Image (cartoon, rainbow, N blue to C red):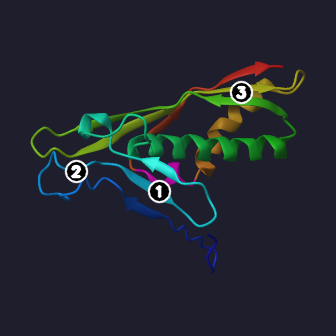
C-alpha cells in the first residue's frame, strides 16, 4: 500500500492457525501453521521450516525472504531491460539462501543469498548489456538494499 512523502507502507496480517486445543502449553503441543493475508489478495499458507517443527507443504519465512529477494531483482531487471531496449522473453531464477544457526542460542541468520537468473532475450539484442543490467538491478532492488548479508547473482543469458 502506498504511503505519503515519498515513502511506501505495506500492511499484512499474519494469523496463527496452529492452536491444537491447548495453545502453547508445551513446545510440541502447538502447530506452526499460519496464514499471511492482505486485503484483496489470496492468502499465503505459512509455517516454520521442517527443521523447526513446521509443515513442509507451507511456505516458511526463510523461503519467503529468498523469494522476496529474487522477485525484487527480477522486477528491477525487467524494468531496466525495457528501458535499455532489450527484450526479455523468458526469465527463471533458481535462487538459494544459506542460513547459519548458533547452537548455543538456537538463533540464526542468513549468511548469503545467491540468485541464479536464466534469462532469454530476443535474438540480436545485446547479451553483454543484458548481463551488465543484473548489476544495476541489484543496486536498484529495495529488498537487497534492506538486508545485512551479501546477495550475489550468477546470471545466464540465452538468445531466443
The alpha-carbon separation of the residues under discs 2 and 1 comes to: 18 Å
User: For the view shown, which residue lies furthest in the front direction?
Assistant: 21
Q: What x and y, as percent, mark residue 141?
A: 59, 50
The alpha-carbon separation of the residues under discs 2 and 3 comes to: 43 Å
Q: Residues within 10 Å of mark 1 (few under 14, many from 20)?
A: some
- Position of residue 148 in the picture relative to residue 92 (left or right): left
Q: What x and y, as percent, mark residue 149?
A: 39, 44
Q: Which residue is rendered at x = 33% and y = 38% of the image? A: 49
Mark 2 or mark 1, which has the lower sequence index?
A: 2
Foreground mark, 2 or 1? 2
- Position of residue 144 in the picture relative to residue 73 (left or right): left
**Which quadrant is the C terminus positioned in?**
top right
Q: What x and y, as percent, mark residue 18?
A: 31, 53
Q: What x and y, as percent, mark residue 19?
A: 27, 56
Q: Which residue is rendered at x = 42% and y = 35% of the image? A: 57
> Which residue is tagged 2?
30
Label of residue 119 in the image: 3
Q: Nearer the viewer, residue 73 or 56?
A: 56
Q: Secondary structure at mark 1?
A: strand
Q: Which residue is rendered at x = 64% and y = 64% of the image? A: 40
State the extent of the magenta-drawn residues as a range: 142-147
Q: Is residue 38 above or below residue 29?
A: below
- Position of residue 3 in the picture relative to residue 148 (left or right): right
Q: Secondary structure at mark 2?
A: loop
**Which quadrant is the N terminus positioned in?**
bottom right
Q: Secondary structure at mark 3?
A: strand
> Which residue is tagged 1?
36
Mark 2 or mark 3, which has the lower sequence index?
A: 2
Q: Nearer the viewer, residue 78 or 148?
A: 78
**Residue 39 falls in image quadrant:** bottom right
Amino acid at each position: 500500500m502506498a504511503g505519503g512523502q515519498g515513502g511506501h507502507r505495506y500492511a499484512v496480517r499474519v494469523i496463527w492457525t496452529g492452536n491444537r486445543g491447548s495453545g502453547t502449553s508445551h513446545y510440541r503441543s502447538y502447530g506452526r501453521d499460519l496464514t499471511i493475508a492482505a486485503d484483496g489478495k489470496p492468502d499465503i499458507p505459512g509455517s516454520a521450516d521442517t527443521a523447526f517443527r513446521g509443515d513442509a507443504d507451507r511456505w516458511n519465512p526463510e523461503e519467503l525472504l529468498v523469494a522476496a529477494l529474487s522477485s525484487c531483482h527480477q522486477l528491477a531487471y525487467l524494468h531496466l531491460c525495457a528501458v535499455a531496449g532489450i527484450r526479455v522473453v523468458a526469465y527463471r531464477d533458481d535462487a538459494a539462501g544459506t542460513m547459519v544457526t548458533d547452537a548455543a542460542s538456537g538463533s540464526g541468520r542468513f549468511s548469503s543469498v545467491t540468485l541464479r537468473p536464466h534469462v532469454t532475450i530476443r535474438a540480436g539484442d545485446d547479451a553483454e548489456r543484458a548481463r551488465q543490467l543484473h548489476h544495476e538491478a541489484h543496486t536498484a532492488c529495495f529488498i537487497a538494499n534492506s538486508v545485512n548479508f551479501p546477495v550475489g547473482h550468477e546470471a545466464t543469458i540465452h538468445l531466443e
